[in-house]
């Protein structure tokens, strides 16, 4: 998942890994999603704030470019907000079926064309995905991190799997049709990927998938910063190399710099939420998620003003499952 970037920089905050971070930086694939955004971007507002677009992608063509229209699709979209105090990280999941304005191109005005937010990635790669999210949120993205699901499996396996609480017994709709029994289970990379992609078996459909993704990210974070990983140099090295090898980041992102900035972040400092919405509707013959415009506007204004803590206090999230 895209939040592997946060795991890596958090681990790099350990002093003994600072120099090693320079070699890990070289292991990252680089892309330039911002140069095509030639005007009309939201302004940067509060000094010290970092906003990142995290994209988990499902590629049918492993050689397809992230920066052009292709066979890639964004299966996971998260806006990660790091406040100026750098004491926590807020991860706002954007439902992939959220119905939003999609510009005609990365350099175009926000426009009137509308569609599912994940379609922007397929239409125009990361540049259009960034433009679309900035149009919807009116928040300037400082960095972009993408990870393909092949990398998702490798990162999880490098940690020896993750522990997750399965909320109900379900059988996967994908081969080899695994059955996930209710209760706490240790999942391999392939199993975890399979589980978090399930949605049709749950009453709340794609919202369950978002919930399970958030659960997985916390489980992965907890496993990555556990003493069993940090005290095991071969295991730690395998995890860091798998994570950085699976990531594609913008040209300006530096793991070493972020390690210093995010040195206080741990699993308990992650705050998960979902972009406010009014549920699903059928528009033009397809099922989409409709944004709750007043609540979403208030949330993203809070992000822009670095006042998300106040927004969360006024809008407590529902109790997480698992």
Image (cartoon, rainbow, N blue to C red):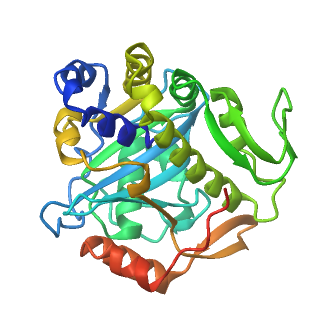
Lateral position of residue 120 relative to residue 128, left or right: right
In-image side of 31 versus 201 (left or right): left
Instruction: Give the residue at x 81% y 53%.
Output: 200
User: How many numbered markers are drawn?
Assistant: 0
The residue under the point 34% across, 62% down is 134
Residue shown at the point (25%, 63%) measured from the top left: 83
Q: Point out residue 233 in the picture as x, y percentages from the top left corner.
A: 37, 16
| Quadrant placement of the C terminus | bottom right
The single residue placed furthest to the left in the displayed view is: 47
Name which residue lies at 86% across and 48% down: 169
The image position of residue 246, as x and y in percent, is 44, 26
Q: Image check: 45 left or right of 312? A: left
Considering every residue shown, the one lying at the far top of the view is 234
Q: Is residue 138 visible?
A: yes
Residue 165, image x, y percentages: 70, 48
Residue 33 falls in which quadrant of the image? top left
Q: Position of residue 219 (x, y in %)?
A: 55, 43
Q: Quick check: can you spot residue 65?
A: no
């Amino acid at each position: 998942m895209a939040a592997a970037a946060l795991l890596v920089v958090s681990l790099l905050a350990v002093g003994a890994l600072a120099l090693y971070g320079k070699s890990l930086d070289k292991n990252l694939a680089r892309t330039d999603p911002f140069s095509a955004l030639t005007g009309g971007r939201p302004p940067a507002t509060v000094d010290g704030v970092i906003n990142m677009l995290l994209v988990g992608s499902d590629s049918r063509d492993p050689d397809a470019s992230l920066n052009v229209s292709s066979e890639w699709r964004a299966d996971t979209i998260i806006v990660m907000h790091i406040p100026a105090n750098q004491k926590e990280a807020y991860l706002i999941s954007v439902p992939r079926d959220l119905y939003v304005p999609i510009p005609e191109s990365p350099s175009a005005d926000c426009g009137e064309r509308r569609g599912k937010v994940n379609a922007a990635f397929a239409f125009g790669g990361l540049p259009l995905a960034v433009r679309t999210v900035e149009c919807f949120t009116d928040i300037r993205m400082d960095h972009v991190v993408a990870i393909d699901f092949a990398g998702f499996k490798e990162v999880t396996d490098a940690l020896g799997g993750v522990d997750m609480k399965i909320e109900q017994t379900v059988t996967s709709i994908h081969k080899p049709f695994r059955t996930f029994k209710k209760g706490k289970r240790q999942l391999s990379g392939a199993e975890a990927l399979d589980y978090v992609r399930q949605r049709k078996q749950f009453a709340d459909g794609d919202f369950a998938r978002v919930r399970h993704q958030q659960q997985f990210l916390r489980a992965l974070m907890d496993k990555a910063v556990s003493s069993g990983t940090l005290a095991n140099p071969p295991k730690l090295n395998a995890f860091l190399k798998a994570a950085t090898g699976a990531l594609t980041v913008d040209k300006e992102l530096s793991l070493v710099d972020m390690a210093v900035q995010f040195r206080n972040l741990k699993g308990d400092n992650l705050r998960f939420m979902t972009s406010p919405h009014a549920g699903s509707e059928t528009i033009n013959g397809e099922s989409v998620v409709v944004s709750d415009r007043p609540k979403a506007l208030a949330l993203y204004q809070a992000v822009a003003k670095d006042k998300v803590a106040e927004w969360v206090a006024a809008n407590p999230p529902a109790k997480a499952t698992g």
